[in-house]
Image (cartoon, rainbow, N blue to C red):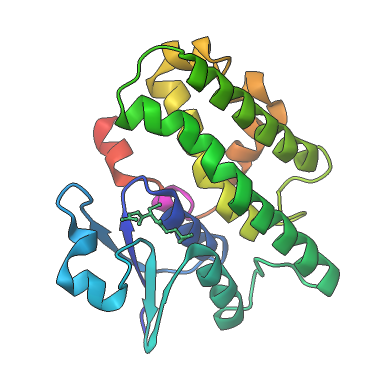
Amino acid sequence: MSLEIWTVSGAPSPWRAALGMAFKGLDYNVNLLSAAQKEHKSDAYLAINPRGTVPTVKNGDTTLSQSVAILAWLDREYPAAPLFGDSPQDAGLIWQRTMEIFDYLPDTTSGILSPIFFQGIGEATDELKVASERLQDELAHLTGILVDAPFLSGARPGAADAVAFPHVRLIQRAMETKPEIMRALGLPDLATVSGEIADWVQRIEALPKVAETFPPHWAEAA
Ligand SMILES: N[C@@H](CCC(=O)N[C@@H](CS)C(=O)NCC(=O)O)C(=O)O
């Protein structure tokens, strides 16, 4: 059996699944699809994922989509280094945080990233300022967790970290590559917005195998 993931460079949902595999120290093969060439809508890909979304993960007879379902499956298939904790209490709390992040964080980060990267907006419009305030509220929520623990999932990296990290790292990427507009939106760098979140990002990035999950096109642009 070999573990495989289908992904698009820079897409946050497959990045979550890859982080789950990295936190567990797993090896896996990457099938990189080109969104520009609509490879995620090809007949071959629709045969394994009829919605044409990423991620899909395959392992022997198991084929799965939906990043959070993949994290839950990984924990049952590869129980070492649990992503959802050791005890019922830990599992409940990590699921609560995972779903809260899933429900609230992606909309607030795409409220900034879509206008800047996909619509080419280069100035701090009123709409973007509102989006920035919403994002800062959500980041404050993450900061509140990280004041008490090194990871969003507690003492160890887990599902809540895997779901949140890509979205926060994409915001940090915008701070690095679009500094003027991000500064104008009150988002100059992560350490200014939240020292706890900046430290958490560094902690995650220092973990084994996490570097392999980063969008390949970032390395090409460097
Ligand atoms: N809730 C799903 C979201 C999957 C999803 O929408 N992925 C995006 C990339 S982050 C995608 O495939 N977009 C292309 C499309 O919807 O056509 C998950 O967590 O896996």
- The answer to whether residue 33 is left or right of residue 135 is left
Q: Where ligand 1 lies, by quadrant?
A: bottom left
Is residue 134 covered in magenta? no
Residue 157 horizontal/vertical position (percent):
66, 55
- Total marks shown come to 0
Residue 191 horizontal/vertical position (percent):
63, 23
Residue 170 horizontal/vertical position (percent):
46, 36
Residue 128 horizontal/vertical position (percent):
49, 21
When the figure is inspected, residue 80 is found, relative to residue 221, above or below; the finding is below
Quarter containing the C terminus = top left
Write the start and end of the magenta stretch as one range: 209-213
Nearest the camera: 77 or 167? 167
Is residue 211 covered in magenta? yes
**Residue 116, quarter of the rendered image:** top left
Furthest residue toward front? 127
Quarter containing the N terminus = bottom left
Residue 179 in sight here: yes
- The answer to whether residue 104 is left or right of residue 208 is right
Q: Residue at x 71, y 57 (%)?
A: 156
**Residue 178, quarter of the rendered image:** top left
